[in-house]
Image: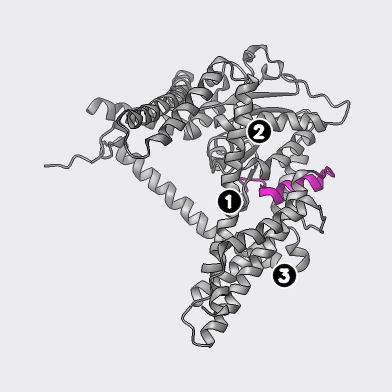
């Protein structure tokens, strides 16, 4: 086997090792490179920032163990952002695992909250927990919260939660933040909350899902979107709260550049081999 | 057989009418109750699914069919985790299992895709013809647009990448969404008229003789 053949059929373990180094190095030795803010992220941030102080917003926490590293840091910073503005937060999740990760996000955000910002459970925020039924469950929750939830995630009866006194349906919220991760559930919010109740919404998804939601953004049904770890990093950057996502975004720089380099290298080698009469 | 089909049609049509038109309070209350049934049935389905899976693995162990030892791992994991969860879902042991086993496994599996995609892209993403060349160029532009430093190193990728994502890609996805929605509407009509019976546990449509 010639060198060209070996390079064209490069051992995948070498590629894995190169990618591992490209991803691990910037995390172990943080290197901050300049970053451009994407239009979708800026739109989503501006939408959140424009919510009037004292409003109540609904947050669907749809992050799992797999997607929390991408969206978790962004959700945490958004919770801080909203609580700083005295915006009240009502969380819910359409998955059992995601309900638990939402608790993690709330706890991490509360730990980062500046002193003096009110963040009392039941007064400034409440986590309604898991709502079964996917899109139908979302519709039921949006139409009558008390018909599907009698207590919050921690077992407190809904009637003993001061924040829920005047809240029972989607139209009681000023906005919706749908942190869908890779659930593919953002259209549930568009169909069951934005369209019937006219409540404006923004969201978060993994990077690969962003094109799926471009039509909703172009039509104005979604006010921008936070895409993957870069979106989270941009939220951290816009809030001047550098955290995990910014570090990971730097890792994606190196991983992405390596990916592009390998693809270009593969094509260059392919054309050389073809010119030399190879059959690859 | 006719009663479940008629019930499905009535309930489905009620939901559709409520979505588009104002309804009397009594009818809205009925719809709210029906929707709450969905959440209860979904939660019950979760339990049913778990039971069916456990019975399946139990039978595999009982009959010592192929790779039955993996089923023991499932049963042990299920009994320990579910048992601790039933005793107290906020117990530290239960949370320890979740935080230190379930979460890292989920995160690790998802992370592996980055390695597989990179290896696959190196081997497959080659400009063998015009079609694959267009795919290759678009993929490189969108990737460079998405990595944070891409816009700084290669500024033209931002307007071109944004155009690719918003216009051709957006149009494709919009077409897919509209097509799926029309398909769902067609499926709804078939369910309401009794031509589609999978929701009743009947796999094949009964053909007219």
Q: Which residue is mark 1?
A: B112
Sooner in the amino-acid sequence: mark 1 or mark 3: 1
Residue A125 appearing in the image? yes
Examine the structure image and report whether residue B2 is included in the region drawn in magenta: no
Q: Secondary structure at mark 2?
A: strand
Q: Residue furthest right?
A: A115
Q: Which residue is mark 2?
A: A59
- Give the magenta part as a residue range: A219-243
Q: What is the chain letter for disc 2?
A: A
Q: Residue furthest left?
A: B209
Q: What is the chain letter for disc 3?
A: B
> Where B38 sits versus A44, above or below?
above
Residue A172 in percent (x, y) is at 65, 26
At label 2, counting other C-alpha atoms closer than 10 Å, the crowd grade (few under 14, some 14-19, many 20 or more) is many
Q: Which residue is mark 3?
A: B156
What's the CA distance linking mark 2 and mark 1? 29 Å
Residue B74 in percent (x, y) is at 45, 31
Residue A92 appearing in the image? no
Residue B76 in percent (x, y) is at 47, 27
Residue A30 in percent (x, y) is at 81, 52
Q: Picture quarter containing residue B90? A: top right
Say which of marks 2 and 1 sits in front. 1
Image point (50%, 76%), residue name: B128
């Amino acid at each position: 086997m010639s060198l060209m053949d070996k390079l064209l059929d490069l051992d995948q373990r070498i590629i894995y090792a190169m990618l591992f180094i490209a991803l691990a190095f910037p995390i172990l030795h943080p290197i901050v490179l300049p970053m451009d803010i994407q239009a979708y992220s800026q739109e989503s941030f501006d939408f959140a920032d424009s919510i009037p102080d004292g409003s109540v917003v609904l947050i669907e926490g749809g992050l799992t163990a797999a997607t929390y590293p991408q969206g978790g840091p962004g959700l945490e910073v958004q919770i801080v952002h909203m609580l700083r503005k005295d915006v009240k937060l009502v969380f819910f999740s359409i998955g059992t695992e995601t309900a638990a990760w939402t608790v993690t996000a709330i706890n991490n955000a509360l730990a980062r909250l500046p002193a003096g910002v009110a963040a009392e459970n039941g007064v400034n925020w409440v986590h309604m927990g898991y709502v079964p039924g996917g899109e139908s469950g979302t519709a039921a929750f949006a139409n009558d919260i008390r018909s599907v939830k009698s207590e919050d995630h921690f077992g407190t009866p809904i009637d003993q939660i001061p924040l829920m006194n005047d809240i029972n349906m989607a139209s009681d919220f000023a906005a919706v933040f749908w942190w869908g991760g890779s659930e593919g559930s953002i259209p549930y919010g568009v169909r069951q909350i934005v369209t019937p109740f006219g409540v404006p919404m923004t969201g978060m998804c993994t990077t690969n899902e962003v094109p799926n939601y471009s039509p909703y953004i172009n039509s104005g049904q979604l006010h921008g979107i936070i895409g993957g770890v870069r979106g989270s990093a941009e939220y951290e950057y816009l809030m001047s709260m550098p955290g995990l996502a910014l570090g990971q975004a730097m890792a994606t720089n190196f991983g992405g550049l390596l990916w592009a380099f390998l693809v270009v290298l593969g094509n260059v080698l392919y054309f050389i081999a073809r010119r030399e009469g190879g059959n690859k | 057989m006719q009663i479940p089909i008629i019930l499905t049609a009535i309930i489905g049509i009620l939901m559709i009418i409520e979505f588009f038109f104002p309804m009397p309070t009594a009818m809205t209350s009925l719809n709210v109750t029906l929707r709450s049934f969905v959440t209860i049935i979904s939660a019950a389905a979760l339990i049913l699914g778990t039971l069916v899976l456990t019975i399946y693995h139990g039978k595999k162990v009982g009959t010592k069919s192929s790779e039955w030892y993996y089923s023991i791992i499932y049963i042990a994991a299920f009994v320990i985790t579910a048992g601790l969860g039933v005793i107290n879902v906020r117990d530290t042991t239960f949370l320890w299992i979740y935080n230190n086993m379930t979460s890292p496994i989920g995160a690790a599996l998802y992370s592996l895709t980055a390695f597989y995609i990179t290896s696959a892209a190196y081997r497959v993403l080659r400009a063998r013809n015009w079609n694959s060349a267009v795919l290759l160029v678009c993929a490189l532009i969108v990737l460079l647009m998405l990595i944070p430093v891409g816009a700084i190193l290669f500024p033209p990728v931002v307007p071109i990448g944004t155009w690719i994502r918003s216009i051709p890609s957006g149009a494709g996805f919009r077409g897919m969404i509209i097509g799926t929605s029309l398909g769902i509407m067609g499926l709804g009509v078939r369910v309401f008229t009794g031509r589609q019976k999978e929701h009743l546990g009947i796999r094949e449509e009964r053909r007219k003789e």
